[in-house]
Image (cartoon, rainbow, N blue to C red):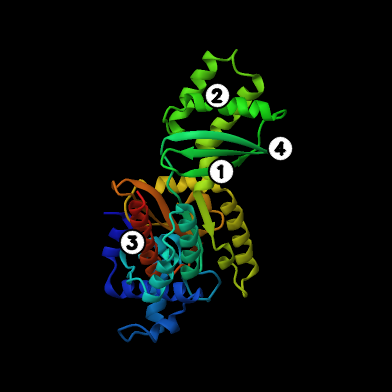
Amino acid sequence: MTDSARLLEEMNDRSREVFRRVVESYLETGDPVGSRTLTRTLSEQVSAATIRNVMQDLEFLGLLDSPHVSAGRIPTQTGLRMFVDGLLEVSDVDATDRQKIDATLGDNSSDVGGMLDRIGSALSGVTHGASLVLAPKHEAPIKHIEFVSLGHDRALVVLVFGDGHVENRLFTPPPGQTPSSMREAANFLNAVIEGRTLSELQTVIREEIQKRRQEIDSLARDLVESGLVLWADEGDQHERLIVRGRSNLLGTDEEEQDLDRIRTLFDDLERKRDIADFLELAEDGDGVRIFIGSENKLFSLSGSSLVVSPYMNADRKIVGAVGVIGPKRLNYGRIVPIVDYTAQLVGKLISDRG
């Protein structure tokens, strides 16, 4: 039993109800809750003084906080965690929300990336938060690699997979590359592909470069070596993460403190590689997971919450994750089933497409 579950179990009915009402009111309005407000909503008739005593006890336990003197109470991060773990009532997905998410699948396109992009946009739309979608890695064997120069500092690598899937990835090539060195690099890579996946190629290519260092031109060798990390790791991570709906986090009546928090959050969302790494850690557990405030180190400065769920392919292997990020004052009871439904839907779509 966790500490929060044990504490919740030890609370009497009145303390538990006062705590639940404070949290639910805060999640709905964002305002501190005072004792007089609670006297009108509690199931038993008690005085405002009695409720103030209960709230003081809850504050002493670290579950409530007073943002200002005599301004009511709001839940602390510990309090929110206890509420989410022990008192949260999760509803079914609203029919309208379900229809909006389902509507993204209307064209039956085989483009998984486009489908995930549309689902991310729909998820951010129905939750009014920022959506995160970690797309599955494409692990099919590579059939062909080609380089296309787009300028002195930009190039495109075209990856053709054995199952017909094609990916184009932009990168910055080493200085001095010429069309002939790019052709030589592509010829070298295509000679050692032999049906290997992108992640399998790393070791093989490094070994081959060591063996054939004299045979391959230095420019072409630099191009291959510099691209290894990009193609098989960093570039893959950046492309796999889809972030949609950042504008949803900006309201028309935000206070300056909230705007500072949102600006910090936007900075966090730009660090796509860090977020992709974090969501991969979230793939370790099944079902929806909720990270509140500093529990999620990536968003701790902005004090945000993340509701995330992994999804599986046809082999019941976790291959990605979907999530919603927003302020700690999320409507968790509504967001959790939406994220869960979306994760199950994405898993089914990925499975159907093989």
Label 1 sits on residue: 168
Distance between mark 4 and mark 1 Cα atoms: 16 Å
Circle nearer the N terminus (2, 4): 4
Q: Nearer the viewer, residue 257 or 193?
A: 193
Q: Are marks 2 and 4 in contact (CB under 8 Å)?
A: no
Q: Secondary structure at mark 3?
A: helix
Q: Position of residue 254 (x, y in %)?
A: 61, 71
Label 4 sits on residue: 153
Instruction: Say which residue appears at 28% left-offset and 59% top-offset.
Output: 6
Circle nearer the N terminus (3, 1): 3
Instruction: Say which residue appears at 47% left-offset and 72% top-offset.
Output: 73
Label 2 sits on residue: 188
Number of the front mark, 3 or 1: 1
Circle nearer the N terminus (2, 3): 3
Number of the front mark, 4 or 1: 1
Q: Position of residue 281 (x, y in %)?
A: 41, 45
Q: From the viewer's perspective, is residue 73 above or below residue 38? A: above
Residue type, label 1: Asn
Q: Secondary structure at mark 1?
A: strand
